[in-house]
Image: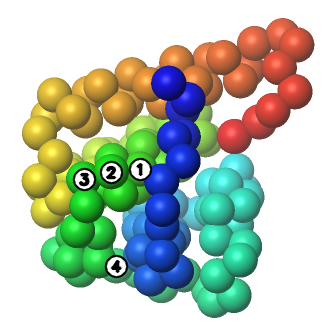
Amino acid sequence: MSFFPTIPVSDAEASAIARALHTMAACDGLHPKEIALIQAFSADLGEAPTPIEPEALAAALPREDLRLLCMKLALLVAHNEGGVSAAEKVLLGRYAAALELPEADMLALEEQVLDELVALSAPGSSSTP
C-alpha cells in the first residue's frame, strides 16, 4: 500500500485540507518546512489558505478516506519540523475528535508518518517531505 493512495478529492475538499494544514502549521508558528509542504499540496488551489475549525473541517470531509488523508497530512506537517508541539497535539486531538477518528487510528497514522519520514531521510533517498 502506498503512503498516499490515490483517492478522488474535489477542489472544495482539497481547499478544506489545505486550510487544516495551514491551521496546523500556524498554531505554533509557521516553519519553512511546513510552508513548503503546504504549498506543494495546495499549489493548484490558487488561494491562500485560511484557518478552519474542526467542525467545519468535518463538514467539508464527509468520507472516511478524505478524513484519514487529511490527518495523515496534518501529522506530516506537525512532525516535519522535528517534533509535535503541545499546541499541535491539542489541534490534532480536536481535528481527530471532529472527524470521528478513534485514537487507535490516529496512532496507526502517526506510525505510518514517522516510518515514511525515516525512510525519506535514509541515505540514498531523493525525496524530501
Q: Amino acid at mark 1?
A: Leu
- Residue 110: give its label: none
Residue 84's place in the image compared with 87, above or below, is above
SS at mark 2? helix
- Which numbered disc flags the more N-terminal residue, 3 or 1? 3
Q: Which residue is mark 4?
A: 52
Q: Which of the two discs, 4 and 3, sits closer to the camera? A: 3
- How many other residues sit within 10 Å of disc 1, few (<14), some (14-19) or many (≥20)? some
Q: Position of residue 74 (x, y in %)?
A: 43, 51
User: Position of 114 compared to 96: left or right?
Assistant: right
- How many other residues sit within 10 Å of disc 4, few (<14), some (14-19) or many (≥20)? some
- Which numbered disc flags the more N-terminal residue, 4 or 3? 4
Q: CA–CA distance between discs 3 and 1?
A: 9 Å
Residue 28 visible to an observer of this rendering: no
Q: Position of residue 84 (x, y in %)?
A: 42, 39
Q: Position of residue 39 (x, y in %)?
A: 70, 66
Marks 3 and 2: in contact by CB < 8 Å? yes
SS at mark 3? helix
Q: Which residue is mark 1?
A: 69
User: Position of 78 compared to 126: left or right?
Assistant: left
Q: Amino acid at mark 2?
A: Asp
Marks 2 and 1: in contact by CB < 8 Å? yes
Q: Which of the two discs, 2 and 4, sits closer to the camera? A: 2
- Which numbered disc flags the more N-terminal residue, 1 or 4? 4
Marks 4 and 2: in contact by CB < 8 Å? no
Q: Which of the two discs, 3 and 1, sits closer to the camera? A: 3
Q: Amino acid at mark 4?
A: Ile
Q: CA–CA distance between discs 2 and 3?
A: 4 Å
Q: Which residue is mark 2?
A: 65
| Residue at 16% over, 46% down | 101
